[in-house]
Amino acid sequence: MDWLCPGYSEVLAKQLDLYHGNVTALNTIRDIVSIVQTGDLHVAVYDLSHELLYVANARGDSEQGPVYAYDRTFLQLNLTEVFSELPPSL
């Protein structure tokens, strides 16, 4: 998405103003990304204070449920655990 899309950027500005000073991963997923409807294919929300990543992907051809990533269930990944995973031994 580029920034020359008033339909998106105006809605994004409104939501960011609404949560100014209190943007969290939860309200980003629930009240910013889903309202702006950005992230058709993929959405990633990082909570660096808690070292968490929330990610959603668009529906695959053989899957059920909402089509767009912003409407789908987000998975929570603990980045401390992810980055402490040892590589497989050969």
Image (cartoon, helix red, strand yellow):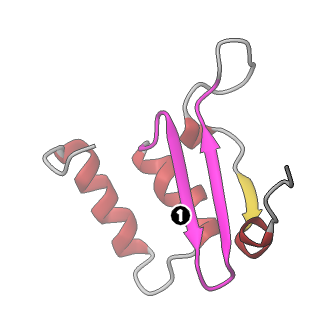
Q: Which residues are magenta?
A: 38-59
- What x and y, as percent, mark residue 15? 39, 64
Q: Amino acid at mark 1?
A: Thr
Does dot 1 land on a helix, a strand or a loop? helix
Residue beneath label 1, please? Answer: 28
Q: Nearer the viewer, residue 31 or 38?
A: 38
Residue farthest along the front direction in this orientation: 90
Q: Nearer the viewer, residue 33 or 78?
A: 78
In reply to whether residue 57 is colored magenta, the answer given is yes
Identify which residue, 77 or 14, lies in the foreground: 77
In this view, 26 is above or below 36: below
Q: Which residue is depicted at the point 60% across and 69% down? A: 25
On whether residue 6 falls in the magenta region, the answer is no
Q: Say which quadrant the N terminus sits in.
A: top left
In the picture, measured across the screen, residue 89 lies left or right of residue 34, that is right
Q: Which residue shows up at 84% across the image and 54% down it?
A: 88
Point 72% across, 24% down: residue: 65
Q: Position of residue 89 (x, y in %)?
A: 86, 55
- Against 76, is 46 above or below? below
Classify residue 83 by image quadrant: bottom right
Q: Where, by quadrant of the figure, is residue 79 drawn?
A: bottom right
Count residues near mark 1 (Cα–Cα under 10 Å), then give few for <14, some for 14-19, many for 20+: some
Q: Is residue 59 left or right of residue 68?
A: right
For residue 11, side relative to residue 34 (left or right): left
Q: Position of residue 43 (x, y in %)?
A: 52, 48
The x, y position of residue 74, in whole percent, is 69, 49
Task: Identify the residue shown where x is 63% and y is 44%.
Answer: 56
Q: Above or below — where is 69 with respect to 51? A: above
